[in-house]
Structure formats: structure tokens, C-alpha cells
Amino acid sequence: MERTAQLTFSPPRRRPAGFDEATLAELNDRFEMAAPSQIVKWAVETFGQSLCLSASMADAVLIDIATQVDPHVEVIFLDTQYHFPETLVTLERIWDRYDLNLRIMRPEVPLDDRWRTDVDACCGVRRVDQLDRALEGKQAWMSGLRRSEAATRADARIVAVDRRGLVKINPLATWSDLDVSGYIDDHDVIVNPLVEQGYPSIGCWPCTRPVADGEEPRAGRWADLEKLECGIHL
Ligand code: SF4
């Protein structure tokens, strides 16, 4: 199989009809106690090929769950060009194990040192813009975002409408770290080796450090800056 980044554009997106606040509230109530696989099943049945999954390759938990529901679900990986080598090896391993329908997005800019001077602009061009492009033509996307990852994520909804007007689904939103580690053990899920080296949240190498005991999982991201999120979940 040829492995190249796919940077094709799809037709313009439209806001999915019927996802008003009342519907979102009903869905979130219904899914609060649901298993992630049930949430993914609803997403696949509702959106079909207009759905994709954005994966960071910290682990394959959501990919493992989602591909059991739909082996062909489209998985998006944002290759910022600044990933740790361990993350790229993990990507290859997960790709091979699940024979993923994988779409790798790469920025149309050369390597630079913008991360030294303007992290928002760097994340904008290397993450946010790439996800925007990947979501062209989609109605909904899934991510592995969890409430327990950071105080800023504590109120994350399971189903929401994002700034693009697309339905954003977080099937693991209610899971604790223990839920995740238990699933990994029970299902022999591939995990990025950096997790064991003190990186519970893995971003780009210039902007990620290991966390100390007692720190939030995302404390190592942009650790010396005010920045908390790259922007793709805002
Ligand atoms: S995490 Fe750092 S290197 Fe990666 S895109 Fe954002 S600013 Fe750039």
C-alpha cells in the first residue's frame, strides 16, 4: 500500500440539520452513562462516511473501539512535522494492526522555527488549518478528548457542535485514566512508549515535556506559556 499524505479537498460542508441545543442536551443525557462503543455506533449510523476520527497516536484506545464498530472509519492524523519519533513509530504500528483507513494531513509550509516565537501561529498552520482541511465535506468528527485530562476539559460534552458547525463527538469524555489503562490492558492496545516515560499527553517535541507526579496530564504541553490548547478542540 502506498503511504502518502492525502491533501485532496472535498465539497463545502454544511451544518447538519437537527442538531439544535435541545437535541444536543437529549443526546448528552442519553450518552452520559453509555459505553464509548455505543456512542461510536450512534455516530457511524448517523453520519456514515461523513464522519471521521482525529487521532493523536498517544494510544489506540478510541481507534480500537471505533474500528470494531466500523473497520473503515476514516482516521485523521495531523502530521505537524514536529512529532516525536516515537509517535511516528506508534502511528505505523497502529496503521498496520488495524489496516487503518488513514488520512495523513501535512502543512503546506516548510519546516521553520515559528514555534520559538509564535506558538499560536505555528499550531494554527500545522494543526488547526490541517484539521479544517481534513474536515471539508464532513458532517461530524470524533476525538479521544476526556474530561479528566485537564481542568479546562472538565466540562467537555460528549456531543457538541464545534466552531465550524460540525458535530463533534467525544466518546471517551467520561472515562478516567483508570478506565483507559484498564481498557489498554484488557485489549492489548498499542500505546506510545512516551506515555511510560512521563508523557501522558503527547504533542510536538518542541512544546511537550514530561510531567511530574501530581501534575495534570496536560501540564507538559506548552509548559512555560499561557497556552493550554492547540486550538483543534476549541
Ligand atoms: S505544538 Fe508546538 S511545534 Fe507543534 S504545531 Fe503547536 S507550536 Fe508548532
Image (spheres, rainbow, N blue to C red):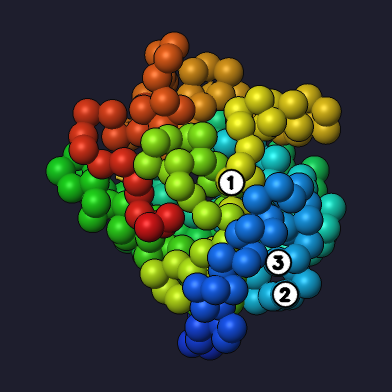
User: Which numbered disc covers residue 18?
Assistant: none
- Which residue is disc 1 drawn over? 173
Q: Is residue 31 above or below residue 167?
A: above
Q: Nearer the viewer, residue 144 or 156?
A: 156
**Callout 1–callout 2 Cβ contact below 8 Å:** no
> Could you say whether the residue bearing mark 1 is in a helix, strand or loop?
loop
Residue 195 on image: x %, y %: 56, 24
- Which residue is disc 2 drawn over? 46
Q: Is residue 84 above or below residue 33?
A: above
Residue 49 on image: x %, y %: 71, 75
Q: Nearer the viewer, residue 88 or 53?
A: 53
Say which label, 1 or 2, has the lower sequence index.
2
Q: Is residue 119 above or below residue 132?
A: above
**Callout 3–callout 2 Cβ contact below 8 Å:** yes
Q: Amino acid at mark 1?
A: Ala
Q: Does the beta carbon at disc 2 come under 8 Å from ligand 1?
A: no
For image coordinates 54% across by 24% down, the residue present is 194
Q: Amino acid at mark 3?
A: Ala
For image coordinates 56% across by 68% down, the residue present is 24
User: Farthest residue toward the top?
Assistant: 213
Residue 66 on image: x %, y %: 75, 54
| Res. 24 visible in picture | yes
Say which label, 1 or 3, has the lower sequence index.
3
Q: Is residue 110 above or below residue 176?
A: below
For image coordinates 28% across by 29% down, the residue present is 223
Q: Does the beta carbon at disc 3 come under 8 Å from ligand 1?
A: no
